[in-house]
Image (cartoon, rainbow, N blue to C red):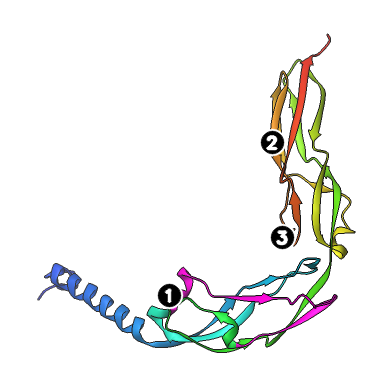
Amino acid sequence: MRSPRDLLVHNWPLKLSALVLSVLLWVLVSAEETTSQLVRIPVQVEVPPGLALAASVPEVRALVTGSGREMIKLYATPPVIRAFVPAGALPPRWRFDVAPSSIQLPPNAKVTVQDVEPRVMDIALDREVSRDIPVALRAVIEPESGYAMAGWAIAPTHVRVSGARSIITQLDSVPTELIEVRGVTERFERSVAVDTAGRSLLHVTPREVTLTGRARRAVP
């Protein structure tokens, strides 16, 4: 009588081929089965001149039905909703009616949008303003041993920020990304990006400032 191990390894190439074939058949069958999924749909809002978004726009959830093969196409080319605020809209909000037909699907994806949530969205608006805001440098600047910093400066010292008035009026400065300059022995120059993380509703110009400084030998 053969042991369980002998039965397992007997004709193992044939058994492995059968297993692979079974998996492939399962994948093919699953790809053709109709399924329904909740898909998150980003909303892209375009506003007319003079207005700006005063708050982030939430995503829409859509119930989408189609075969597994077709649903995969939504990951390669994500669907989107584009909302165009009319020129006559006034702050503080504009109401946007969301319908399944509002979703722009990939042209090659044979899927159907059954429902969307929410059906109504209030888009927060405000007047667009621009201000010159001071730049707050976030940096670690260290001279080499035996040297001392003679000074540093950034240029420009202000950036132009445009966006909703309710957001702009709360800004007292705009920080840079953190930069580290160590072992300084002479004059140096670095480009530092303005930190725009969490400020997607604002337009900042320029997006970089220049940091310059110099070190000199310390007096014994």
- SS type, badge 2: strand
The amino acid beneath tag 3 is Ser
State the residue at coordinates (77%, 25%): 213
Q: Spatial distance from mark 1 to mark 2, Cα to Cα?
A: 42 Å
Furthest residue toward bottom: 114
State the residue at coordinates (22%, 75%): 21
* Residue with the mark numbered 3: 200
In the image shown, does 107 or 39 lie closer to the viewer? 107
Q: Spatial distance from mark 1 to mark 3, Cα to Cα?
A: 29 Å
Q: Is residue 185 above or below residue 182?
A: above
Q: Which segment did they paint magenta?
A: 71-99
State the residue at coordinates (58%, 83%): 62
* Residue with the mark numbered 2: 191
Q: Spatial distance from mark 3 to mark 2, Cα to Cα?
A: 22 Å
Q: Quadrant of the N terminus?
A: bottom left
Mark carried by residue 19: none
In this view, the mark in front (1 or 3)? 3
Mark carried by residue 72: 1
**Percent of width and height locating residue 43:** 64, 74
The amino acid beneath tag 2 is Ser
- SS type, badge 3: loop
- SS type, badge 1: helix
Q: Is residue 153 above or below residue 4?
A: above
Asked if marks 1 and 3 touch (Cβ < 8 Å), the reply is no
Q: Quadrant of the C terminus?
A: top right
In the image shown, does 129 or 29 lie closer to the viewer? 129
